[in-house]
């Protein structure tokens, strides 16, 4: 079993600070396992809100929950949204000492309800699939190919992993999306999701996708928002400021899990992956997610101008500006575009992340960094 120490620490901190902690993430990413592991050495009570016996125990939720001590875990909170009001009443009681850990697969309505009803009382922790910092170095290729969903990554073979991912995609389309109150034909969403795989790492263009699929721009936007709110797709927003250069203002689209991307592209093994025309984009998206897992910041952007200058990742930390460029190359160089980004955006430092093994500086503000060393990416205080 892979110990998820970083997320355990995040939960511990969040529950110490706030009466309610919401652990969010896609289905099958390990929320329940993490919550049960976290509660093992604590006084805790667990409720599965999709279980009939637990539903019966909560017929009068305020009465059932008010007498409990320690930590109360409410799994699949999206199935009983009326509990948000109950939690607000309970945590506002003067002598309340109980901490609530709520688990849910994100939906726009769930996030909105939690944020509004429990404003000032809830802290959010986002759980992802496995990351490089949690696995053995020798398994980096496997993580890239299979993605970070536990059952996909830990499957006995690549074939078993691909079979699990196909089942996940079908279940997500046919059951999970409807359970979130969203009515969209599974076949239409599958076509959109598959088409989107070919645009991984590229600028969002609703009109182009709409023409290819025969849907309106508004429909395309709605489908994209669904996949984003359920943690399937990341919309990386552009950074733009009052510069003389014309800057791109459309978001870039990335699959958050490389394994799901590869399944939709019918890439079931490493040989097929490395021979595919989109291998570079796949690796760069994978490297982006691993980098964001280390940075743990919400102020993330990309930067691009119509004259060709661009930066894959731009982020702010303590008032300083940093950049990261991802290169699927054995010997990446500091391009004119990178130097332009350093000068134009007044960056304090840029890292060029690549799949090699040697870290070295190529400029006082530019360092080449192997992806396997991404945990060493440090920013100045």
Image: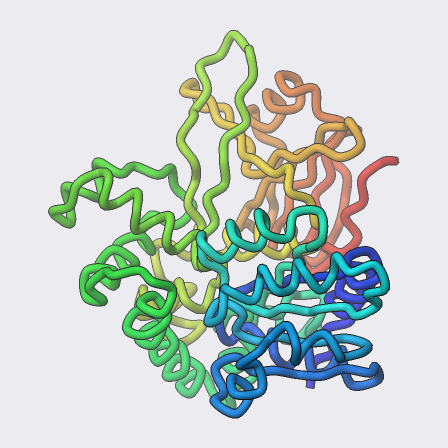
Left/right of residue 29 with respect to residue 272 in the rendered view: right
Name above or below for residue 51 compared with residue 145.
Answer: below
Q: As drawn, which residue projects farthest toward the top?
A: 244
Name above or below for residue 160 compared with residue 87.
Answer: below
Percent coordinates x, y for residue 13 in the rendering: 82, 60
Left/right of residue 329 with respect to residue 282 in the rendered view: right
Query: Visible in this render: residue 29?
Result: yes
Number of labels in the image equals 0
Quadrant location of the N terminus in the rendered image = bottom right
Q: Which colouring convention does the figure follow?
A: rainbow
Left/right of residue 186 with respect to residue 133 in the rendered view: left
Q: Residue at x 49, y 60 (%)?
A: 106
Name above or below for residue 79 compared with residue 107.
Answer: below
Tell me the quarter of the picture where residue 92 sits: bottom right
Tell me the quarter of the picture where residue 37 sits: bottom right
Q: Residue at x 73, y 39 (%)?
A: 367
Q: Residue at x 76, y 81 (%)?
A: 39
Q: Nearer the viewer, residue 45 or 344?
A: 45
Query: Visible in this render: residue 26?
Result: no
Name above or below for residue 291 compared with residue 9.
Answer: above
Percent coordinates x, y for residue 286 in the rendering: 53, 57
Quadrant location of the C terminus in the rendered image = top right
Q: Nearer the viewer, residue 345 or 79?
A: 79
Percent coordinates x, y for residue 306 in the rendering: 41, 20
Q: Nearer the viewer, residue 350 or 124?
A: 124
Q: Residue at x 58, y 87 (%)?
A: 57
């Amino acid at each position: 079993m892979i110990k998820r120490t970083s997320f355990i620490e995040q939960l511990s901190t969040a529950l110490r600070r706030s009466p309610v902690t919401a652990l969010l993430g896609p289905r099958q990413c390990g929320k329940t396992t993490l919550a049960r592991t976290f509660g093992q050495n604590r006084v805790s009570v667990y409720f599965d809100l999709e279980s009939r016996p637990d539903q019966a125990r909560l017929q009068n939720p305020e009465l059932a929950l008010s007498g409990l001590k320690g930590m109360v875990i409410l799994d699949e909170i999206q199935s009983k949204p009326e509990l948000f009001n109950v939690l607000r009443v309970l945590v506002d009681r003067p002598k309340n000492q109980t901490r609530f850990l709520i688990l849910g697969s994100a939906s726009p309505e769930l996030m909105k309800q939690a944020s509004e009803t429990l404003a000032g009382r809830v802290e959010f922790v986002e759980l992802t699939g496995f990351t490089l910092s949690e696995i053995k170095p020798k398994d980096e290729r496997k993580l890239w190919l299979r993605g970070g969903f536990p059952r996909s990554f830990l499957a006995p073979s690549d074939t078993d992993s691909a079979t699990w991912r196909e089942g996940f995609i079908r279940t997500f389309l046919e059951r999970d999306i409807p359970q979130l109150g969203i009515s969209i034909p599974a076949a239409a969403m599958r076509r959109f999701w598959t088409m989107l795989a070919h645009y991984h790492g590229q600028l969002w263009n609703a009109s182009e996708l709409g023409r290819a699929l025969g849907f309106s721009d508004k429909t395309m936007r709605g489908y994209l928002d669904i996949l984003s709110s359920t943690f399937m797709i990341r919309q990386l927003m552009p950074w733009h400021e009052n510069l003389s250069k014309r800057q791109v203002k459309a978001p870039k689209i990335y699959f958050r899990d490389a394994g799901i991307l590869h399944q939709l592209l019918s890439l079931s093994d490493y040989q097929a992956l490395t021979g595919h025309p989109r291998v570079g984009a796949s690796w760069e998206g994978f490297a982006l997610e691993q980098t964001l897992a280390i940075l743990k910041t919400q102020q993330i952007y990309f930067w691009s101008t119509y004259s060709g200058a661009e930066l894959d990742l731009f982020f702010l930390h303590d008032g300083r500006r940093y950049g990261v460029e991802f290169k699927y190359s054995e010997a990446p160089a500091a391009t004119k575009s990178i130097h332009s980004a350093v000068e134009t955006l007044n960056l304090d430092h840029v890292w060029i992340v690549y799949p090699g093994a040697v870290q070295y500086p190529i400029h006082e503000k530019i360092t080449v960094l192997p992806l396997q060393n991404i945990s060493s990416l440090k920013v100045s205080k």
